[in-house]
Amino acid sequence: MERYEELREARLLENKRRLAELKIEPLVAAPTVFKKPVSAGAAKRKRLAEPEQPLRRSLRQQGVTAKDEGNGVSATTDLEAITESKSSVSTKPLRASATEPITSDAVLTSVLRGDQPGFTDARIDAKSEEKEQLREWIVECLAGKWSKLSRKSPLKHSEREWDGMDVASETEVAKLLDHRTYSVAFLASDSAVGIAGSVKGEVGVWNWDVQKSKSSRLAACTFKFHTAPVTSILPCSQSTQRVYTSSYDGLIRVLDLESETVSDVICGDRRTPWANISDDLQSFSFTAVSAGRTSSNSQLVASDSYGRLVLFDPRTPSDSEVYSILPGKKVHTVHVNPADENYFVTSDRDATVKVWDRRLLRGKPSQRTKTPPGPVGEYCCSRVQSFVKWSPCGTQVASIGFDDLIHIWKVSSSFDLHASQFTIKHNNQTGRWLTPLNVDFFDSESLLVGSLQRTLQVFSAEKDNAAKPEYRLSWEVGGYSHPLITAVMSVNAVHPKRNLVLSGVGSGRCYICTQP
């Protein structure tokens, strides 16, 4: 051990001698640390934030023509800027109680103040003539004078043409809601008036004909009717003045433009805890509301998140009948046959599509809730079907769900859904942040559905084999390269009398797809 220590000391001395010969001590010396300069009593000042400059818009978006620019006349705000601008959303409902009327002055003041989404504060300093035009538009909206009800029948299969339909210009896009679109529908009239509901209870009305004409009148208006997602929108088929909305908040409300009021058709008990709604007969969580096309919406059917069906007359909602078809499990949607109001179809949490006969459900009014005798037709799928709907002629039923299929059944008098079932492979995995896809009949033989590739698709039945037709993709528009469509169009609605399609996306924008 002593020998090892001697060798070690000798090697250390040899290394020190060699380093001294190289003269590199200044290079390996510790760096000099300089102290930071100290300000002598100088107080620090916070830099003021620069004011945000408004986004610059082109003269076309500002609505300034060449003539106005030359004469120095400031043009009015263009409709595109009005409908696409963002503003703060008022959480205060439009009315304080169910009996308080919505007057034109109240709506006008709310719009001018900027409480409604989709309108800018520039309207506050608008000229007197612009205010008068806006007032006239609001009065027309509340009076239901957008369009008179036409007695035309829905378009037939030969009259529907999807070739050339597209979202071609910015006039076919509107920022109608401030939150994710959950449901859309068209009014039952000749005019292109679309209605959309959001996940925050907003209901927006968009008159596309006014926006397309590029007049100075306001083309859209948004109200807050609910405190939870608007699950379905039901325009009255015999009157353009009434629109029913259902929501998870346990309310079914009707907007009556003729009497200028919003009233509660069914109002659940708000004092009931959320966990006890399924056991309380006075509280609901509505998933859909539907009615026939020929009865002026006198008989409505609503589905509930706790396995219940509610059959009621809006004129006497206290006499409603509640049927428990799937206790404790959600009924996703319900839709009444447009051709025969005695039949309606449901899709539930058990991945089952059922056809019901209203006449078999009739019982004594004194029985508040009861178990129905059973459906007349039934089909069990492999996954839950999030949406189901009858065809306009009432002979087919289509559903879409999480089994990545679109199901079509040709319903006969025997209601044997297993004998006439067709499927279309389709990716329906929307996930958590997208509204589940819905399906609508473009005509009696074609289906319209959105896709996760940001496209609208139409599947048509081949006429070669009428007994067992094959549905193939016949039309598609949109995609990742489309300049205007920038999101998945989850919910879509077909106009009953015109070749128009209304689509809603997650950002609250709505699109009108039409022919040029």
Image (spheres, rainbow, N blue to C red):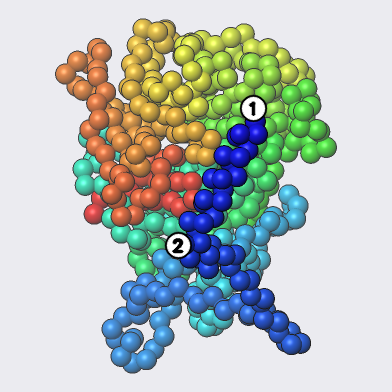
Q: Is residue 186 left or right of residue 204?
A: left
Residue 64 x, y percent position in the rendering: 35, 80
Give the distance between the C-alpha atoms of the residues marked 2 and 1, in whole angstroms: 90 Å
Q: Quadrant of residue 290?
A: top right
Mark number displayed over residue 304: 1
Furthest residue in direction bottom, as rendered: 71
Position of 203 relative to 28 (above/below): above
Q: Residue at 76% across / 52% down in the picture?
A: 97
Q: Quadrant of residue 36?
A: bottom right
Q: Residue furthest left?
A: 464
Query: Can you tell which of label 2 and label 1 is closer to the viewer?
Result: 2
Give the vertical position of 62 relative to 14 (above or below): below
Q: Report the residue at 58% width, 68% height from top.
A: 31
Q: Quadrant of the N terminus?
A: top right
Res. 223 in view:
yes
Callout 1 amino acid: Asp
Q: Which mark is residue 265?
A: none
Name the residue rendered at 45%, 46% in the picture.
Answer: 505
| For residue 267, side relative to residue 52 (left or right) | right
Amino acid identity at mark 2? Leu
The residue labelled by disc 2 is: 22
Mark 2 and mark 1 residues within 8 Å of each other at the beta carbon: no
Q: Is residue 270 above or below residue 344?
A: below
Of the numbered discs 2 and 1, the one sitting upstream in the chain is 2
Circle 2 residues within 10 Å: few <14, some 14–19, many ≥20: few
Query: Residue 429 in the image: x percent, y percent?
Result: 44, 29
Residue 159, given in percent of the width and then of the height, sits at 24, 39
Q: Is residue 148 visible?
A: no
Question: Which is nearer the eye, 317 or 501?
Answer: 501
Q: Is residue 286 left or right of residue 380?
A: right
Neighbours of disc 1 within 10 Å: few (<14), some (14-19), many (20+): many
